Image (spheres, rainbow, N blue to C red):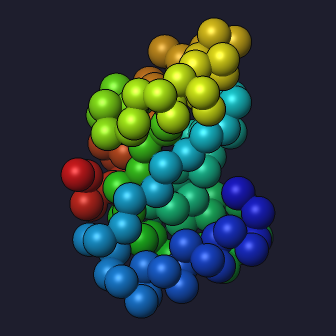
Amino acid sequence: MDLEIQQRVKDLTEKYGAENIVVILGGAEAEASGLSAETVSAGDPTFAGPLAGVALGLAVYHIVEPEIKEECDAAVYDEQCSMMEMVLDVEDIISEVNTIRDQYSKYNK
């Protein structure tokens, strides 16, 4: 997660409160998605960005997780994400993000 996005997440959390923020990821790999999930929940593990040492505890999900998929308009999801599901290792991504969420998120929705 780049530094600009980290700052935007931090600013939005300060403005609206961590309990009102849900981060939806769209990374193509489990490891990258897990790193992003950890960044917004436990703080930037690389200690390079605005979230270094800042444990926001945010709820974080990947777009391919059933909880999020169910909330999306089916036609829009199909148009924007269904092709992605065919080429990604969806089970690994879900497992990685779920592990991080269970470990660090304080505000699971």
Q: Residue 41 versus residue 28: which sits nearer the camera?
A: 28
Answer with the quarter of the image where residue 30 lies. Answer: top right
Q: Is residue 31 above or below residue 10?
A: above
Q: Residue 77 versus residue 109: which sits nearer the camera?
A: 77
Locate residue 93 relative to residue 41 in the image: left or right.
right
Give the total number of marks visible in the rendering.
Answer: 0
Q: Where is residue 39 shown, x and y percent of the image?
A: 57, 59
Image point 36% across, 83% down: which residue? 16
The answer to whether residue 31 is visible is no
Answer with the quarter of the image where residue 1 lies. Answer: bottom right
- The extreme front residue here reads 75
Q: Is residue 33 above or below residue 60?
A: above
Image point 51% across, 62% down: which residue? 40
Image point 43% across, 43% down: which residue? 61
Locate residue 32 relative to residue 75 in the image: left or right.
right
The answer to whether residue 44 is visible is yes
Q: Residue 22 versus residue 30: which sits nearer the camera?
A: 22
Locate residue 59 relative to residue 55 in the image: left or right.
left
Q: Residue 107 versus residue 73: which sits nearer the camera?
A: 73
Q: Is residue 57 above or below residue 85?
A: below
Locate residue 13 relative to residue 20 in the image: left or right.
right
- The extreme bottom residue here reads 15
Image point 32% across, 39% down: which residue? 71
Q: Where is residue 32 shown, x and y percent of the image?
A: 68, 39
Q: Where is residue 17 shown, x and y percent of the image?
A: 32, 81
Q: Is residue 45 above or below residue 7?
A: above
